[in-house]
Amino acid sequence: MQFTHKEFIYGRKIDLDLCDGLIEYFEEFPMGRHVIPYEGRGDFICLKRPGHTANGDEGDKQEDGKTSTDLGVPYVVKDSRVAKFNKALNEVLDDYCEKFPNCEKCQQPWGNAAFEQFNIQKYKPKEGFTKWHTERASLHPNVISRHLVWMTYLNDVKDGGGTEWYHQDFQVQAQKGLTVIWPSDWTHVHRGIVSPTETKYIATGWFCYLPSEEEWTTPDRLQGRRGYFYSRDLFIPFE
């Protein structure tokens, strides 16, 4: 897979066992609402449900252009499969920052979003996110802080199943372990490519700007209608 600087899209493969671990994690959860306590400081509310988006003024909503099953996963969940994946993800991010150093320079501090969760998504045959979309398209608090997008294909899909970017006229195939990072804004409008015959699993999320408001950086304070932590000390460090 060749990625050029003009696209600002970069990817490489991570260990394939990490992908198996996330699929296993996804399948362990039944549909519905799940409460995950975090070290006595409050609860993360996670949902496994039909695919939703959070880009509109209405907040989370089910889209006509997206058919999937999604599971929200807190970055700080106490599960070795998630922790190992996070480490590998940050190594790909290091590579991205080396290729595009200005994504770090002249920027407000940013990191993995402890208040965002990442998603594991399952697309059955003929399902997909077929609507052209971008990851930061409104002032809604769930999306405004997004800086970079990442996505990992958790299994191989040979009959369709990849992703395409509109302005770059660029496609990638769904290859197990391939982790791709790109900017969150309108320049990188994209959509999924449906597989008519195969199931696709991905993990996807965002690297977000840290909140600057003082009340959002108090370690023990809970913010947001979904109970996410807006706290600097909960952002995953890059090591």
Image: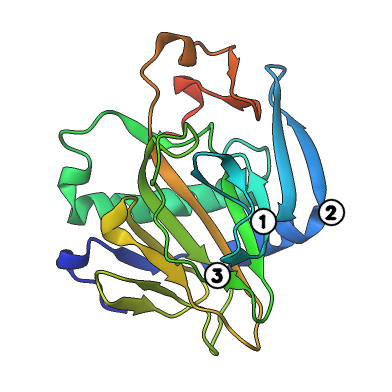
Q: Is residue 112 above or below residue 229?
A: below
Could you tell me residue 164's position as x and y percent? 38, 74
Question: Looking at the image, which is closer to me, 92 or 226?
Answer: 226
Which residue is tagged 3? 16
Q: Earlier in the sequence, mark 1 or mark 3?
A: 3
Report crowding for label 2: few under 14, some 14 to 19, many 20 or more residues within 10 A (C-alpha): few
Q: Quadrant of the C terminus?
A: top left
Is residue 234 placed above or below 126 in the rendered structure?
Answer: above
Separation of residues labelled 2 and 1 (CA atoms): 11 Å
* Residue 95 shows up from this direction: no
Say the numbered circle drawn on residue 30. Answer: 2
Q: Which numbered dot is residue 70?
A: 1
Picture residue at 15% right of the left edge, 44% below the top: 102
**SS for callout 3:** helix
Residue type, label 3: Leu
Q: Is residue 211 above or below residue 152?
A: above
Is label 1 or label 3 in front? 1
The quadrant the N terminus occupies is bottom left
Task: Please name the amino acid that badge 1 sits on.
Answer: Asp
Circle 2: residue type: Pro
- From the viewer's perspective, is residue 72 above or below residue 1? above
Relative to 111, 17 lies left or right = right
Q: Residue 119 versus residue 185: which sits nearer the camera?
A: 185
